[in-house]
């Protein structure tokens, strides 16, 4: 029982020291490789999965495999919670307790903003938040983007030489050569397709919720002709403002997509560059920073969706007093 | 030689595009200043002020992120 007695400086700091020493040893044997950074996600297969008439060929990219892994993780989590809940205990324990606390916090947050439309808005808000959070955090698992298949670079591009570690297992070195690693997994938010899809879903669903709550009257948010004829000057102003609102909804798609993409892609580039230049101890600090950024971006994405959806449920009558 | 000039122009363009981060930095600083002053005067409003501050920071940060995306496009795509 001596091992569990409280110590002044915990026992685990020796693990930290051991890992730092291990990193120094590993770096001296395998110097870090200059990363191969691409904005577009890489194709894993050489032949397309299927071909659509207008869009073209669809390849299996490394962000799609990550999406599969994240989906399976979320489904497993939901299954674990379901199994724990169906036991009938009043106090959910373990994973289910954590999930219940999180969902309850999210629900209360939705209730303070959305009011009586909470039941309509909460599923979208929570889904966006959980999916973006998982997809941001899963990319921080060490070595997540390090494994992949070797491919030859095109002529004239930068590549690295490859050596054989084990039979069938190769590693690239920092010597110039003609190989590059196409990793099997890559953080989903570093792919513009994913973020644009989420932004489109968010903005279009916002309009659907607006029409559902306010009926056809919701169109006055974008083409406000209600006061055009009885108030000559301010009616025209209201109309112009409402058309600006339409344009700002379009800009919202861009803003949603590029905010998530830019933050996560910048984080990935920062992590790669720092890990290749200062491979000892610095990457862990950057990873801690990226953990916070990933959480905040997931929170911001969900929160903005929530705010815009609850704005869409509020009619023009309530917005009139601060417009005049 | 021409290739080198194009490469140099790429790097210069990427650097110039990041000037836009200046405005976003000022904006984030101002919004945090306002929120902190509000919290210092009335500590009870910490929760709502913090949430709104994060939202405001995200909005002004988006401007800097646009510049960053342009810089990345210049460096890695074009």
Image (cartoon, grey):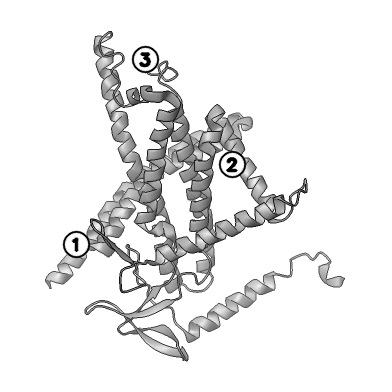
Residue at which label 1 appears? B9
**Circle 2 Cα neighbour tier, 10 Å, few/some/many (<14 / 14–19 / ≥20):** some
Q: Contact, CB < 8 Å: mark 2 with mark 1?
A: no
| Residue A18 visible, this orientation | yes
Q: Secondary structure at mark 1?
A: helix
* Location of residue A174 with respect to B52 vertically, above or below: below
* Location of residue A290 with respect to A150 vertically, above or below: above
Residue at which label 3 appears? A324
Identity of the residue furthest to the left in this view: B2
| Residue A289 visible, this orientation | no
Q: Secondary structure at mark 3?
A: loop
Residue A313 in the figure: left or right of residue A86: left
Q: If the image is split into quadrants, where does the N terminus of chain A sit?
A: bottom right
* Disc 1 versus disc 3: nearer the observer: 3
Residue at which label 2 appears? A106
Expressed as whole percent of the image width and height from the top left, the position of residue B61 reads: 40, 45
């Amino acid at each position: 029982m001596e091992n569990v007695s409280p110590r002044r400086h915990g026992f685990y700091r020796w693990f930290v020291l051991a890992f730092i020493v291990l990193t120094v040893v590993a770096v001296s044997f395998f110097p870090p490789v200059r990363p191969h950074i691409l904005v577009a996600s890489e194709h894993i297969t050489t032949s397309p999965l299927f071909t659509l008439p207008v869009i073209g060929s669809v390849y299996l990219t490394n962000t799609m495999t990550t999406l599969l892994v994240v989906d399976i993780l979320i489904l497993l989590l939901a299954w674990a919670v379901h199994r724990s809940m169906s036991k009938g205990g009043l106090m959910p324990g373990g994973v289910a307790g954590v999930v219940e606390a999180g969902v309850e916090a999210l629900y209360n947050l939705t209730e303070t903003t959305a009011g009586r439309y909470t039941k309509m808005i909460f599923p979208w808000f929570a889904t966006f938040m959980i999916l973006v959070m998982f997809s941001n955090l899963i990319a921080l698992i060490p070595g997540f983007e390090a494994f992949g298949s070797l491919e030859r670079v095109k002529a004239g591009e930068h590549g690295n030489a490859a050596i054989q570690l084990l039979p069938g297992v190769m590693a690239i070195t920092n010597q110039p050569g003609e190989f590059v690693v196409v990793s099997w997994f890559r953080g989903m938010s570093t792919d513009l397709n994913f973020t644009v899809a989420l932004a489109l879903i968010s903005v279009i669903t916002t309009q659907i919720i607006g029409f559902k709550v306010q009926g056809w009257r919701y169109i006055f948010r974008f083409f406000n002709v209600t006061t055009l004829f009885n108030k000559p000057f301010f009616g025209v102003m209201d109309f112009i403002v409402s058309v600006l609102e339409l344009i700002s909804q379009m800009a919202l798609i861009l803003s949603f997509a590029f905010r998530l993409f830019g933050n996560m892609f910048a984080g990935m580039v920062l992590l790669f560059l720092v890990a290749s230049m200062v491979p000892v101890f610095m990457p862990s600090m950057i990873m801690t920073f990226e953990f916070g950024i990933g959480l905040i971006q997931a929170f911001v994405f969900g929160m903005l969706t929530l705010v815009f959806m609850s704005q869409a449920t509020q009619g023009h009558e309530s917005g009139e007093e601060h417009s005049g | 030689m021409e290739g080198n000039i194009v490469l140099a122009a790429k790097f210069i363009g990427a650097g110039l595009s990041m000037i836009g981060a200046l405005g976003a930095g000022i904006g984030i600083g101002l919004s945090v200043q306002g929120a902190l002053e509000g919290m210092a005067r009335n500590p009870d409003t910490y929760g709502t002020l913090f949430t709104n501050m994060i939202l405001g920071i995200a909005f002004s940060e988006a401007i800097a992120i646009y510049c960053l995306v342009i810089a990345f496009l210049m460096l890695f795509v074009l």
